[in-house]
Amino acid sequence: MATASVIVPVYNAGEYLAPCLDSIAAQTFRDWECILVDDGSTDGSGSVCDSYAARDSRFRVIHRENGGVASARAEGVRASAGEYLWFVDGDDLTHREFLARMVEAARGQKAPILACRVVPFRDTLPREEPAGDCRVWEGEEAIHHLLHDKAIDYGLYNRLFRREVMEPEFLDNGFKYNEDLLANWYALERAGKIAFLDFGGYFYRQVEGSASRKKLTAPFITQQWQVAGLIARGRTQDTIRSFYYEKLLYLYSMILRQNHWQEFSYLGRALQGFIRREFSAAMKYKTLPGSMKAAAFLSLLPPAWYRVICRAVLKDRR
């Protein structure tokens, strides 16, 4: 049994796939297996997967009809056997020492979930920065860092999970948007703690026209709202309530920033209604940043007025 199982969902990754797989093959830690889930690719990505499996037995390929990235990851987990799980997107790159450093830190800290820094890039990798220390958080502190700490991120790709805290059903959770956040939430509920290694171990490729940059749709809004609601449901902790309120402020501002914003006016009214109803309570949240409290105050303005402010000062997050 390999120490680490690397799960790579592959769908039409094109020219980026081979560099991604090369970066996995170049890991200085050698005790791994890589499950390549060809999710119905039509651009030859499946053949690229087969070629890597033919020359390195640690690569294994599953070919299947297209079912989406979440179910592809879940299928990869079911086919894997490693002590740790690592999810890599087929158009990204990995630091050659990701597994070596992360496995050592996870074992040393007895961390069921260990995250590292995500390094965004476009054409060339930025210069490597020195690594820092490893921190471990438990209980409500762990929840706070998952929901509010941008260094930890909402993704799955910059983490090692012990197998027992990440079930296939956590990944294939029925959502297309913020499904990674929900999977992380389920895993943290089981693990009870999360660690962070200050190390730029995962290189996230920013591609124009990627799924995160397409035209706004109603499911993009409603599913993020639903995921945040599942996390916040029945919970009174300040850090969770402030996360939920901030998410709704973000979604409302995103609607108003669109050229076709009136197409989503019904969602905007619903979001603004909640923001208004919870305004007094939100002003008392200790973990809601001052900038978000100011945004909440401004969001009480008529939508057309607040839209001018949003379009002038805000940008969409990845």
Image (cartoon, helix red, strand yellow):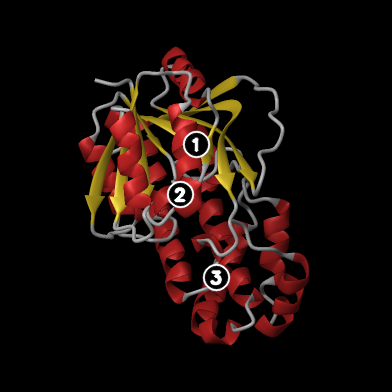
Query: Tag 2 or tag 1, which sits nearer the N-term?
Result: 1
Q: Which residue was labeled with disc 1?
A: 158
> What residue is disc 3 on?
277
Q: Residue at x 78, y 71 (%)?
A: 312
Q: How far apart in space, not on screen, are marks 2 and 3 (Cα)?
A: 16 Å
Camera-side residue: 292 or 4?
Answer: 4
Identify the residue under disc 2: 236
Residue drawn at 60 percent across, 58 percent down: 282
Whether label 1 touches label 3, CB < 8 Å: no
Q: Is residue 26 above or below residue 149?
A: above
Q: Where does the image place residue 64, in percent across and percent down from the top left?
A: 23, 54
Q: Quadrant of residue 165?
A: top left
Q: Nearer the viewer, residue 40 or 157?
A: 40
Looking at the rendering, in which quadrant would you find the C terminus?
Answer: bottom right
In terms of secondary structure, where does tag 2 sit?
loop
Q: Does dot 3 land on a helix, a strand or a loop?
A: helix
The residue at the point 28 percent across, 27 percent down is 57
Q: In the picture, residue 3 is in which quadrant?
A: top left
Residue 204 vs 199, above or below: the answer is below
Q: Amino acid at mark 1?
A: Asn
> Residue 315 at what x, y percent from top left?
69, 63
33 on left or right of 151: left
Q: Which numbered mark, 1 or 2, is in the foreground of this view?
A: 1
Q: Quadrant of the N terminus?
A: top left
Task: Name which residue type carries label 2.
Answer: Thr
Asked whether the viewer can see residue 289, the reply is yes
Task: Say few, some or many: other residues with alpha carbon within 10 Å of mark 3 (under 14 / 14 to 19 / 20 or more).
Answer: few
Disc 1 and disc 3: Cα gap in Å?
37 Å
Closest to the camera, between mark 1 and mark 3, is 1
Q: Earlier in the sequence, mark 1 or mark 3?
A: 1
Classify mark 2: residues with Cα within 10 Å, few (<14), some (14-19) or many (20+): few
